[in-house]
């Protein structure tokens, strides 16, 4: 069997066609990656700059939404009040936005063929650039005070935070806490400094002084630092609200 002779010109032409095809594939990959990068940068800019104070309504395909990620404003408010968190426009957010959150937004926009607006964030106050007057969650509005959870990151909230923040929910909780704290405080003072005062009337007098002192110090501290109850500042953009 005779071997066919090699035509060097045709070999070079085939090699050129192969290299050009590979180059076209590389260029296409570069264009796709560049487009993805530009899309991610645009999403990050949209989240960082935020939107107007009014809530936008996003035109989702409701058949594609996960019902477990839909929350009413009242439910978000309760969580914020219980754990002393803020629910604010993302333009106030000063923490780092993880890449997973951007991917989640990009995936949701591609699935629903929509450009999301009205981003909001649930997080502790320290994560926001608040004006004078450990577990972020990114939301977008659906309309009628319903919000869709896009992404959650960070560590889960410590279970003790809810208990520690209980006195700061509202005035009633603060008074109840002050009452029981004053009672225990009075009992401790009597045992250490006034052990001879065993009459109920004497204990009540000490308790009244302790209760008044605790209330006075609490309100002095709160007013001087411009603090407010969680029920009043959960959606406030002011650090002293």
Image (tube, rainbow, N blue to C red):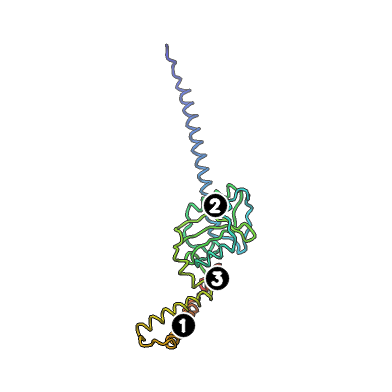
Q: In this view, does 3 lie to the left or right of 233?
A: left
Q: How crowded is mark 1: few (under 14 residues within 10 Å), some or many (20 or more)?
A: many
Quarter containing the N terminus: top left
Image position, residue 102 (x, y; %): 51, 52
Say above or below: 93 vs 68: below
Image position, residue 164 (x, y; %): 45, 69
Say above or below: 126 vs 9: below
Image position, residue 174 (x, y; %): 50, 76
Q: Residue furthest top?
A: 1
Is label 1 in a helix, a strand or a loop? helix
Q: Identify the residue at image location x=64%, y=58%.
A: 143
Is label 3 in a helix, a strand or a loop? helix
Residue nearest the viewer, comparing 198 with 25: 198
Disc 2 to disc 1, C-alpha distance: 51 Å
| Label 3 vs 1, first from the N-terminus | 1
Q: What is the number of the mark on residue 211?
A: 1
Q: To which residue does mark 3 refer?
A: 231
Image position, residue 51 (x, y; %): 59, 60
Q: What is the number of the mark on residue 236?
A: none
Indicate which label's residue lies in the foreground, 3 or 1: 1
Q: To which residue does mark 2 refer?
A: 105
Indicate which label's residue lies in the foreground, 2 or 1: 1
Q: Identify the residue at image location x=63%, y=50%.
A: 62
Residue nearest the viewer, comparing 16 with 220: 220
Residue 190 visible here: yes
Residue 241 visible here: no
Indicate which label's residue lies in the foreground, 2 or 3: 3
Disc 2 to disc 3, C-alpha distance: 30 Å
| Label 2 vs 1, first from the N-terminus | 2
Q: Identify the residue at image location x=36%, y=88%.
A: 196
| Label 2 vs 3, first from the N-terminus | 2
């Amino acid at each position: 069997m005779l071997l066919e002779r090699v035509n060097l010109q045709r070999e070079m032409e085939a090699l050129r066609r192969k290299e050009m095809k590979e180059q076209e594939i590389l260029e296409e990959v570069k264009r796709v990656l560049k487009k993805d990068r530009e899309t991610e940068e645009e999403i990050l800019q949209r989240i960082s700059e935020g939107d107007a104070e009014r809530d936008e309504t996003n035109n989702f395909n409701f058949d594609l939404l996960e019902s477990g990620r839909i929350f009413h404003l009242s439910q978000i408010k309760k969580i914020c009040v219980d754990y002393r968190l803020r629910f604010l426009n993302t333009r106030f957010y000063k923490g780092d936005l993880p890449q997973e959150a951007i991917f989640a937004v990009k995936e949701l926009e591609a699935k629903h063929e929509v450009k999301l607006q009205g981003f909001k964030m649930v997080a502790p106050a320290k994560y926001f650039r608040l004006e004078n007057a450990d577990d972020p969650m990114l939301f977008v509005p659906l309309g009628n005070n319903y919000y869709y959870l896009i992404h959650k990151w960070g560590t889960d909230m410590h279970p003790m935070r809810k208990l520690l923040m209980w006195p700061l929910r509202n005035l009633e909780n603060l008074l109840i806490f002050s009452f029981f704290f004053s009672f225990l405080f009075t009992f401790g003072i009597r045992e250490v400094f006034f052990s001879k005062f065993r009459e109920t009337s004497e204990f009540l007098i000490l308790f009244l002084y302790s209760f008044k002192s605790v209330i006075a110090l609490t309100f002095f501290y709160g007013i001087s630092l411009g603090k407010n109850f969680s029920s009043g500042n959960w959606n406030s953009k002011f650090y002293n609200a």
